Image (spheres, grey):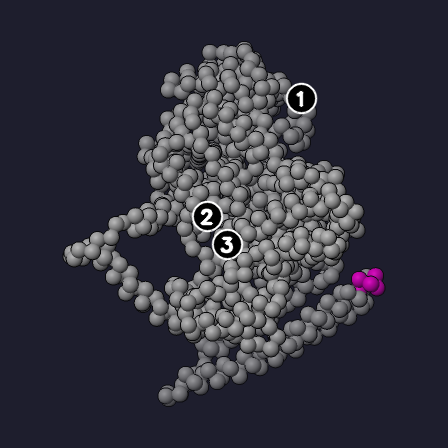
């Protein structure tokens, strides 16, 4: 079998295992727990005496376990440091509700009694247990309540505490299903079809996973390969067998016990004749990505399904279409509650917050204003309310304006939730529409508060990333508006970081090598001394040896410090006597003196990683060690059958905490990047569109980088922004605009699904010749997009080749060539044959010939599509040995040219 990349089964299993290590919630257990709760609620009371039931015995055991947990929690609380910078994290370590309340009150008392009161912490803690009936705790809580009643604190909460408003107070997070999730699972359990429209991070994937609770054989369609890996890893965590229908893995074998078939539309459709259409249930993830392949698969399946999306505006129309070509009743669940705050930022020469109203004009304030996909954060609402209060100060509307205030809108007893925020947002938006009709001048004045040109003064990605690091905005995904620039952005960032590091710290690596040289010499002498110490027999022999070694170490540390300081001074002289321009020379000397002083106060006589990047030009919290880089390099070399230099930018950038995720990159590298992201072990990943579709990763910030004067589509923006701030991973998210005109995409409406208009040929009907259990007649009718056409084509008797080339009108010339081909054994002739083969394939694909680029060993954008066809032809088992040699020869050269393009060799 021919594969684009060789994949080691053990390496893939390790990748999947690493992915599912972070999965803490078992959907099957959640469903079972929900059943137990419902059973208890519905159970009738029985006052008759009877012997202990199994349930009563379990309850007694749970009570004993609970008491034991209370004792353990008390000990933990005693060990907690009240000065902990992030005390909320300690709540997760406590197992009992009673002790969580106790710890909360202890913290609250601690902060309340401080002279300089930390109101963010006090308000955040107070509302967690302000309704408790515990008399000991009520004394403090009532005291705080009386104090708070004298102040208007709710706007303060909006302005400063958005990151801990429920459900973001995840230290008090209770793992249970939401009501809408329970309803969805019941529909699936009853073997009915269902559409779910719910926001990003609302928990749609849980519902998709729940299907395996009720059905043995499931097809799960994902929008992109990394999503398929993630979904598959979840199923494998549930001890289910998974077959992956993605590039290179789709040709792996599977047995009749395989439960889950998960993959992307491209490879599911390609191998549908092998896996068949006889599934018990199907899941259509990110259904808004519906293309021709996705539509074709759906039309062939007879089972009920679950369709998931966050961004579909014409969902009723889509459901009606699905009803026609599936002949099924379809239910709909819509859920609109928000689970995360996404703050928008723009880079000028600094990071500036962007208010949603910055993209709104006066004429936008009509009924359509509510249809804009323009969510406000609590901080945005605080700003809006403050400006409304200051501008609309007329006595005639004083009461109306007062009713808009946070103090009058929100309940006094409860901590404001994100759902409350969502309702308050709608309340203020409706008020804006009303005020614009009654008081246009004041409304225009209000909008002027948010007008800003936000002009970028200088393109400086590195400075932007450094500021982002200071604001704790990592991990970050970076996307380019022109996808072809993804690799260029990565390479330029790599080159610029290296240059700036060299300019500002010209002797950084020399110093590391000098330190390592002295350390190894010292270590060698220390080991020799330790091994050769001869001690008299006495009870204090060990103590004597320790004293001798301590004296040696102290002496050597002083000598090491002196030598390194002398080395620093020699380098300062070197800089002074260099031909470097004065302003750069000054920077270099200041940097070196700063590092010398730091060393002097804390000498580091220890092992030195001589390849470690300078902290000023690294974004990683912990640099990747050289050993890990060597392992990665070995894996990639094995998978691609080539040798990559250790100095290659993808390895050097990993040391700086920066990765690249691109469809053209080696699989082993992409798997490692996905694992590093999942574990928050990498700070920045520059990606193409593959990581913007439905992937659930702990990303705090999405950065949209404008390139080549191209803009992002509204769909791009929605998908990419949806990767930031994920439920269960984080309590905040950010969207950062860099060098783009963001105002139009910010206020764009949720896109309409129109379906594909790609032509479908009658070759599709030959699918039943490859698998007589598949009916593909439905595929060529009832198109979602009325512009899509069904066309009769020129076919041959070879059903496999017809299927491989089903998207092209006439493949007869290729089949004739394959059938009549006789191999040339001389390489130069084989090359000529290869050119002829490629010309025929290009003619079938209706693309310009690649002959010139191929012969000149240059890259062409069509190489990968041609490689895919060659792989399918080779693996179709319908060809003779001579043509297999030619296909392999052509594949090897195209692959080499393709890999050279992405600068791997």
Residue 661 percent coordinates (x, y): 58, 43
Count the numbered circles shown. Answer: 3
- Identified at 51% across, 82% down, the residue is 550
Examine the rendering and report whether any part of residue 817 can be seen. no
Residue under numbered circle 3: 167
Q: Is residue 541 above or below residue 678?
A: below
- Identified at 47% across, 42% down, the residue is 204
Q: Is residue 264 above or below residue 36?
A: above
Residue under numbered circle 2: 19
Residue under numbered circle 1: 848
Check residue 375 in the rendering and tell me which mark sits there, or answer none. Answer: none
Instruction: Quarter of the image for the N terminus: give it.
Output: top left
Examine the rendering and report whether any part of residue 772 can be seen. yes
Instruction: Quarter of the image for the C terminus: give it.
Output: top right
Asked if residue 657 lies in the magenta stretch, the reply is: no
Residue 821 percent coordinates (x, y): 52, 15
Front: mark 2 or 3: 3
SS label for mark 3: loop
Q: Is residue 250 left or right of residue 633?
A: left
Asked if residue 584 lies in the magenta stretch, the reply is: yes
Q: Is residue 753 left or right of residue 506?
A: left
Residue placed most toward the observer, 425 or 102: 425
Mark earlier in primary sequence (3, 1): 3
Q: Which quadrant holds residue 408?
A: bottom right
Mark 3 vs 1: CB contact within 8 A? no
Residue placed most toward the observer, 287 or 19: 287
SS label for mark 2: helix
Q: Residues within 10 Å of mark 2 (few under 14, many from 20)?
A: many
- Write down the region rendered in magenta: 581-585
Front: mark 3 or 1: 3
């Amino acid at each position: 079998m021919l594969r684009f990349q060789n994949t080691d089964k053990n390496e893939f299993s390790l990748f999947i295992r690493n992915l599912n290590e972070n999965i803490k919630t078992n959907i099957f257990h959640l469903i079972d727990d929900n059943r137990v709760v419902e059973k208890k609620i519905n159970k009738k009371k029985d006052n008759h005496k009877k012997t202990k039931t199994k349930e009563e015995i379990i309850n007694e055991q749970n009570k004993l376990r609970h008491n034991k947990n209370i004792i353990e929690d008390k000990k933990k609380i005693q060990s907690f440091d009240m000065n902990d910078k992030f005390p909320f994290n300690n709540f997760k370590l406590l197992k009992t509700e009673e002790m969580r309340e106790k710890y909360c009150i202890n913290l609250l008392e601690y902060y309340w009694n401080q002279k300089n009161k930390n109101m963010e912490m006090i308000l955040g803690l107070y509302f967690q247990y302000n309704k408790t009936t515990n008399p000991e705790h009520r004394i403090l809580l009532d005291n705080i309540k009386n104090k708070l009643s004298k102040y208007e604190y709710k706007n303060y909460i909006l302005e400063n505490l958005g990151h801990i408003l429920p459900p973001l107070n995840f230290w008090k997070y209770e793992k249970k299903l939401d009501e809408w999730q329970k309803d969805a699972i019941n529909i699936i359990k009853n073997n009915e079809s269902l559409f779910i429209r719910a926001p990003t991070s609302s928990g749609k994937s849980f519902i998709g996973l729940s299907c395996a609770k009720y059905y043995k054989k499931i097809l799960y369609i994902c929008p992109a390969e990394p999503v398929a890996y993630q979904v598959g890893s979840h199923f494998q965590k549930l001890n289910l067998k998974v077959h992956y229908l993605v590039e290179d893995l789709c040709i792996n074998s599977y047995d009749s016990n395989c439960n889950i078939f998960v993959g992307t539309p491209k490879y599911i459709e390609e191998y549908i004749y092998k896996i068949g259409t006889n599934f018990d249930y199907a899941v259509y993830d990110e259904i808004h990505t519906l293309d021709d392949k996705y539509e074709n698969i759906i039309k062939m399946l007879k089972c009920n399904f679950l369709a998931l999306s966050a961004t579909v505006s014409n969902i009723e129309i889509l459901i009606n279409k699905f009803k026609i070509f599936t002949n099924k009743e379809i239910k709909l669940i819509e859920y609109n509650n928000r689970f995360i705050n996404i703050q928008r930022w723009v880079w000028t020469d600094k990071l500036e917050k962007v208010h949603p109203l910055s993209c709104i004009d006066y004429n936008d304030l009509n009924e359509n204003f509510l249809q804009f996909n323009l969510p406000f954060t609590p901080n945005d609402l605080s700003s809006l309310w403050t400006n409304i209060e200051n501008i609309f100060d007329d006595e005639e509307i004083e009461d109306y304006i007062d009713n808009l205030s946070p103090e009058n809108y929100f309940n006094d007893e409860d901590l404001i939730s994100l759902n409350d925020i969502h309702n308050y947002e709608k309340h203020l938006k409706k008020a804006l529409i009303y005020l614009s009709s009654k008081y246009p001048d004041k409304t225009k004045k209000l909008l002027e508060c948010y007008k800003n040109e936000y002009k970028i003064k200088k393109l400086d990605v590195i400075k932007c990333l450094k500021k982002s690091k200071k604001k704790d905005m990592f991990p970050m995904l970076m996307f380019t508006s022109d996808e072809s620039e993804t690799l260029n952005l990565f390479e330029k960032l790599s080159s610029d970081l290296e240059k700036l590091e060299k300019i500002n710290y010209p002797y950084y690596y020399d110093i590391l090598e000098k330190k390592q040289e002295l350390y190894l010499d010292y270590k060698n002498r220390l080991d020799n001394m330790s091994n050769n110490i001869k001690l008299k027999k006495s009870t204090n022999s060990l103590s004597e040896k320790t004293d001798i070694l301590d004296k040696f170490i102290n002496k050597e540390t002083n000598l090491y410090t002196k030598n390194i300081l002398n080395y620093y001074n020699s380098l300062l002289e070197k800089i002074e006597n260099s031909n470097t321009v004065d302003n750069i020379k000054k920077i270099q000397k200041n940097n070196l003196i700063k590092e010398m002083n730091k060393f002097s106060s804390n000498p580091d006589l220890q092992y030195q990683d001589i390849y470690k990047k300078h902290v000023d030009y690294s974004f990683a919290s912990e640099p990747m060690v050289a050993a890990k880089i060597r392992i990665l390099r070995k894996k990639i070399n094995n998978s691609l059958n080539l040798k990559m230099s250790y100095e290659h930018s993808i390895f050097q950038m990993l040391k700086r905490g920066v990765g690249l995720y691109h469809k053209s990159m080696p699989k082993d590298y992409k798997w490692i990047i996905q694992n590093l992201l999942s574990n928050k072990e990498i700070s920045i990943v520059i990606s193409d569109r593959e990581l913007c579709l439905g992937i659930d990763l702990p990303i705090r910030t999405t950065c949209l980088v404008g390139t080549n004067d191209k803009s992002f589509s509204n769909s791009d923006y929605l998908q990419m922004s949806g990767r930031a701030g994920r439920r269960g991973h984080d309590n905040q998210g950010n969207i950062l605009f860099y060098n783009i005109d963001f105002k139009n995409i910010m206020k764009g409406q949720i896109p309409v699904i129109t379906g594909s208009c790609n032509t479908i040929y009658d070759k599709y009907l030959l699918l039943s010749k490859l698998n007589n259990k598949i009916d593909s007649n439905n595929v060529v009718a009832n198109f979602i997009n009325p512009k899509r056409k069904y066309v009769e084509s020129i076919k041959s008797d070879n059903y496999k080749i017809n299927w491989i080339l089903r998207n092209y009108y006439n493949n007869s010339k290729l089949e004739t060539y394959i059938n009549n081909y006789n191999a040339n054994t001389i390489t130069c002739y084989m090359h000529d044959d290869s050119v002829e083969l490629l010309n025929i394939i290009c003619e079938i694909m209706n693309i310009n010939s690649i002959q010139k680029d191929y012969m000149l060993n240059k890259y062409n954008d069509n190489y990968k599509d041609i490689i895919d066809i060659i792989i399918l032809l080779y693996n179709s088992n319908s060809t003779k040995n001579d043509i297999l040699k030619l296909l392999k020869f052509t594949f090897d050269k195209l692959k080499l040219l393709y890999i050279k393009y992405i600068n791997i060799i």
